[in-house]
């Protein structure tokens, strides 16, 4: 009989298992993959943006879904303590733009290896197998049943099995089914931090083109409201658009429906419209007898030029000295605001984060323990909590995992003193 079993060895599970083992508890970590931290390995494009070095209020403001639920978890284990934790494990960190925190090495494997060494150091038992159901006795938890029939007996269970995004890493949604089977309500799942579908031939024509240092604005056309504005990188694909800017923007599109949201790409955010027109006029004067389409290579990526020309009323082979002031200004206006209408999200299995999950009203925010099943705890993405990009979602996993572990360790100490 274990003091606690943890289902899932992602950020929340590794943190919970390690802390409880360090506290002297008999802990079993159940993972279906042959090695832990599969999803951690690919976060932040393999660099692992593990947290955001901000204060509590700024953090909560970056969690649009049930942010207030996290006050206790983030107070108990804030970003600065997480950073100190990894420094003690021998992983030096750095803070980049937007207060995003990464390992100095830019290698997610260093975070995974440090956490793996952490649980080994304190003799946490690791079991490879897939959890399929929770075992209940007299209204409380008593263990976990695995797919192969094995029973893991434990007085408490932490469900840290992730969401339903990136199922190849093990986050296949099985945790929701187990939670629902013991009475927990599951808020409908939807993708967050996900590529966007755009039905525009221009995206297909520019497929593979990566844009850097562009500004993206997103308008909710139903409310005539700007919901997102940021500068960074994005990518055109066969289905629409992706890349860091797009993933960030997707989490602001809370009421997705076809053509509700309009993207506006500013290719030259450092230049005003007048400055851009002055530059274009200078290019035209230096190439007065050349065709319009052949003078844009210093202004736009090669793959974008045919698209940009096709969307304006300037004939591609019109000589530069024949382009009117109105045509020139209209073209500059287009470069400063290239529009695309969003048809919808890509599928949940392409999302970085799952929105939806275990209803937080059925979980005690001060302990992460179920209000319905004694001894059952939740941590990480399985909960109906999701945040914007910038390290927030991983911090939520670490903080909720740590709070569940602290609660269990305190309960076990209290039990042993009786």
Image (spheres, grey):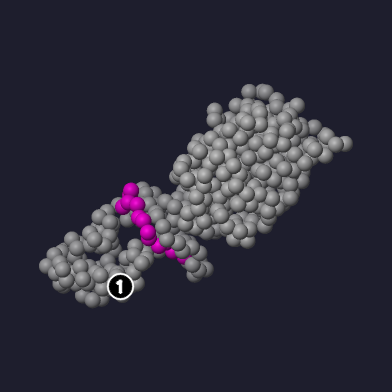
Which residue appears at 53% of the width and 35% of the height? 113
102 displayed left or right of 379: left
- Residues 124 and 104: in front is 104
**Residue 288 visible in the displayed image:** yes
User: Where in the figure is residue 282, as x and y percent of width and height?
Assistant: 21, 71
**Residue 339 visible in the displayed image:** no
Q: Which residue is mark 1?
A: 275
Direction left: furthest residue: 289
Direction right: furthest residue: 418
172 displayed left or right of 271: right
Which residue appears at 42% of the width and 51% of the height? 243
User: Where in the figure is residue 157, as x and y percent of width and height?
Assistant: 71, 36
Q: Is residue 214 magenta?
A: yes
Q: Quadrant of residue 231?
A: bottom left
User: Where in the figure is residue 95, as x and y percent of width and height?
Assistant: 50, 53
Which range of residues does the magenta coloring cover? 206-220
16 displayed left or right of 87: right
């Amino acid at each position: 009989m274990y003091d606690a079993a943890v289902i899932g060895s992602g950020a929340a599970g590794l943190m919970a298992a390690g802390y409880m083992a360090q506290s002297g508890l008999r802990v079993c970590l159940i993972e279906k993959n042959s090695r832990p931290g599969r999803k951690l390995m690919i976060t932040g494009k393999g660099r692992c943006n593990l947290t955001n070095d901000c204060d509590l209020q700024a953090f909560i403001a970056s969690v649009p879904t049930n942010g207030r639920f996290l006050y206790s978890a983030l107070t108990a284990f804030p970003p600065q303590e997480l950073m100190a934790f990894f420094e003690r494990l021998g992983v030096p960190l750095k803070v980049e733009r937007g207060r995003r925190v990464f390992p100095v090495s830019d290698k997610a494997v260093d975070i995974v290896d440090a956490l793996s060494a952490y649980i080994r150091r304190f003799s946490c038992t690791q079991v490879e197998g897939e959890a399929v159901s929770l075992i209940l006795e007299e209204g409380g938890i008593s263990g976990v049943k695995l797919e192969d029939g094995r029973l893991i007996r434990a007085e408490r269970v932490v469900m840290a099995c992730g969401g339903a995004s990136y199922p190849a890493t093990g986050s296949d949604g099985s945790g929701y089914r187990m939670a629902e089977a013991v009475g927990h309500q599951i808020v409908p799942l939807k993708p967050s931090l996900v590529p966007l579908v755009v039905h525009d031939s221009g995206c297909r024509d520019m497929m593979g083109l990566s844009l850097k240092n562009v500004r993206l604005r997103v308008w909710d056309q139903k409310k005539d409201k700007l919901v997102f504005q940021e500068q960074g990188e994005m990518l055109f694909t066969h289905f629409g658009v992706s890349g860091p800017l797009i993933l960030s923007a997707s989490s602001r599109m809370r009421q997705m429906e076809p053509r509700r949201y309009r993207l506006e790409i500013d290719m030259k955010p450092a230049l005003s419209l007048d400055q851009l027109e002055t530059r274009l006029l200078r290019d035209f004067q230096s190439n007065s007898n050349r065709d319009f389409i052949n003078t844009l290579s210093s202004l736009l990526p090669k793959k974008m030029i045919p698209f940009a020309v096709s969307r304006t009323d300037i004939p591609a082979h019109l000589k530069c000295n024949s382009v009117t002031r109105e045509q020139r200004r209209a073209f500059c206006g287009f470069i400063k605001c290239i529009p695309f209408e969003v048809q919808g999200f890509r599928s949940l299995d392409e999302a970085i984060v799952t929105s939806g999950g275990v209803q937080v009203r059925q979980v005690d925010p001060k302990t992460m323990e179920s209000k319905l099943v004694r001894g059952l705890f939740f941590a990480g993405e399985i909960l109906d909590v999701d945040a914007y990009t910038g390290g927030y979602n991983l911090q939520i996993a670490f903080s909720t995992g740590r709070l569940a572990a602290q609660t269990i360790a305190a309960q076990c100490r209290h039990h042993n003193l009786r």
